[in-house]
Image (cartoon, helix red, strand yellow):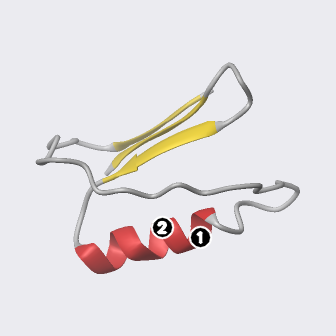
Amino acid sequence: KGYVKNLPDGSVEAVFEGDPKSVSQMVKWCHQGPKASFVEHVLAKEADGLSNFETFKITY
């Protein structure tokens, strides 16, 4: 659960919420990204508390 969105500067912001193993797998995937993408840098940090997302949303 969470979201991913493109930012005006060309970077991408993603927030993941779930069990630690699933979140870790998503962060690992972010280091390679989807086909035809170029990942220059990944900054991962834990957020304080839970946001209780209902779904996972992609915003362009």
Q: Which mark is residue 51?
A: none
- SS at mark 1 in the image: helix
Residue 50, percent from left and from top? 13, 47
Judging depth in this view, the residue of 38 and 54 nearest the camera is: 38
Tell whether 17 sits left or right of 33. left
- For label 2, the residue is 26
Hey, what amino acid is under mark 1?
Answer: Trp
Q: Quadrant of residue 60?
A: top right
- Is residue 6 shown above or below 55? above
The residue sitting at 29% across, 56% down in the picture is: 46
Q: Quadrant of residue 44?
A: bottom left
Hey, what amino acid is under mark 2?
Answer: Met
- For label 1, the residue is 29
Residue 37, percent from left and from top? 82, 54
Residue 15, percent from left and from top? 39, 46
Q: Residue furthest top?
A: 8
Mark 1 packing: few (<14 Cα in 10 Å), some, or many (20+)?
few
- Is residue 26 shown above or below 14? below
Quick check: marks 2 and 1 in contact, CB under 8 Å? yes
Judging depth in this view, the residue of 23 and 44 nearest the camera is: 44
- SS at mark 2 in the image: helix
Judging depth in this view, the residue of 59 and 10 nearest the camera is: 10
Measure the C-alpha gap from mark 2 to mark 1: 5 Å
- Is residue 1 shown above or below 10? below
The residue sitting at 16% across, 47% down in the picture is: 48
- Is residue 4 shown above or below 29? above
Residue 38, percent from left and from top? 83, 55
Tell whether 4 sits left or right of 55. right
Tell whether 33 sits left or right of 27. right
Report how many numbered discs are placed on residues in the image: 2
Q: Quadrant of residue 32?
A: bottom right
